[in-house]
Image (cartoon, rainbow, N blue to C red):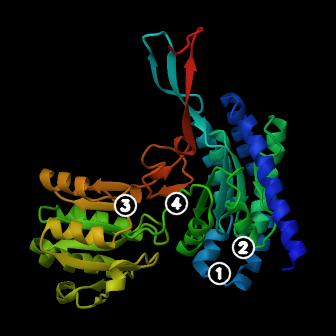
Amino acid sequence: MSASSQTSLSDYCKEAALRAKRASVELAQLPEVQKNAWLQESAAALRSRTSELLLANEKDVTAAPGYGLTPAEVDRLKLTTSRIEEIAVGMEAVAALPDPVGEVIESSVRPNGLQVLKTRVPLGVVFFIYESRPNVTADAAAICVKSGNAVILRGGKEAAHSSRAVVKILQKVGQKHGLPADAMHLVETLDRDAVSHFLALPEYIDVAIPRGGEGLIRRVVAEAKMPVIKHFTGNCHVYVDASADLAMAERIVVNSKCHRYGVCNACESLLVHAKVADKFLPLLGKALAAREVEIRGDEATRRLVPAAKAVTEADYAAEYLAPIISVKVVASLNEAIEHISRYGSRHTDAIVTSDVTAAQQFTAQVDSAAVLVNASTRFNDGFQLGLGAEIGISTDKFHARGPCGLKELTTYKYVVLGDGQVRE
């Protein structure tokens, strides 16, 4: 790219970010009723313009083979009438959630009469980078605007026509309901360098949120001059303890692994206590074989499940996003925890046990964003945990951890009310 075109791209990104920053000031003061009205009418507009969205999406699906998308990736890209209905229902669900902006988290009155309020406020401007799923465009816009944030949407080129059609509808409804014109901005250029330009604008953009493959996320973390909310991988574990109800354990492992393969909270690694391995693994092997899941196991696992392949060190750390699972037989709960600590990604890990002490030790010592007892890893999800819509899952400890929804897109400020006090 020439120097002049690079300058032009830089100017475009800077102007978009500046306009988003100005819009964020207005959004921070927008009443909840106004935001909810936009969400509800946007849902209705998406339904009424289904044919328009399908036509736009057809262009993306037709072009998909040229981008090298796999059949599974094309399926995630594709919109249908039912999927558009799901998007609309999702926007209505966000409208039904409490508005976090303005919430008084704590309050106190000082001896001198000063009233101190710890008040929830929006982060400001969100730069959201994501791959080819057009439903995510609407989800991100809904969550950001409801939490009082302006959002810059950088979707994958594979879904460009679909995302443009979605944003066009949301913006048109936004104008009707008094949203700032730049409350949501879809990055039109497909130039990959645009991401780098946006990530170098901390004076305008308050947080970057990448949602996609590990390569994308690591690039954003390496280049961003502002905080990043993210997780790199989802190498999630289920540990079947010596005291586990084995029928329950089978249901949980099968659901954790097979409910959906290509998601970050799917189980990728299974640990089984040696005391129950002889009974449990042959049964589980049959259940996974029936679902065409490949097992990669240690020597003890392969003795009990002859169809299993030999596991490697890399397998224990892998996020497969596919019908493959690594399996290891462990001698103790401590060994299971040590294995998770070494190979896990601090995303989601579960124990199946009837021993309360074992459950307590597991939840205390496994350092992950979500730790589950006798439940599928698939529950680490905003809606499933009763937190509402989410823009992603964070494995960080600052500023947000776990499913990131409306509250995670806010921070707080101290508002101090006085009647003339001065410091002595």
Task: Using the rendered view, name the quadrant where residue 306 is placed.
Answer: bottom left
Query: Is 67 drawn above or below residue 33 in the view shown?
Result: below
Determine whether, in the image, residue 131 is placed left or right of residue 344: right
| Foreground pick, 357 / 398 | 398
Query: Is 188 drawn above or below residue 167 in the view shown?
Result: below
Of labels 1 and 3, the one closer to you: 3
The disc label shown at residue 348, or none = 3
- Image marks 2 and 1: residues in contact by CB distance under 8 Å: yes
Task: Using the rendered view, name the quadrant where residue 374 is placed.
Answer: bottom left
Q: CA distance from mark 3 to mark 2?
A: 29 Å
Classify mark 2: residues with Cα within 10 Å, few (<14), some (14-19) or many (20+).
many
- Whichever of callouts 1 and 4 sits on the residue coming sooner in the sequence is 1
Determine whether, in the image, residue 180 is placed left or right of residue 250: right
- Residue type at mark 1? Leu
- Residue type at mark 2? Glu
Classify mark 3: residues with Cα within 10 Å, few (<14), some (14-19) or many (20+).
many
Secondary structure found at label 3:
strand
Q: Which residue is tagged 2?
A: 158
- Image marks 3 and 2: residues in contact by CB distance under 8 Å: no
Secondary structure found at label 4:
loop
Instruction: State the residue at coordinates (57%, 16%).
Output: 417
| Foreground pick, 214 / 287 | 214
Residue 143, horizontal then vertical, whole percent? 62, 46
The disc label shown at residue 230, or none = 4
> In this rendering, does residue 50 appear at all?
no
Of labels 3 and 4, the one closer to you: 4
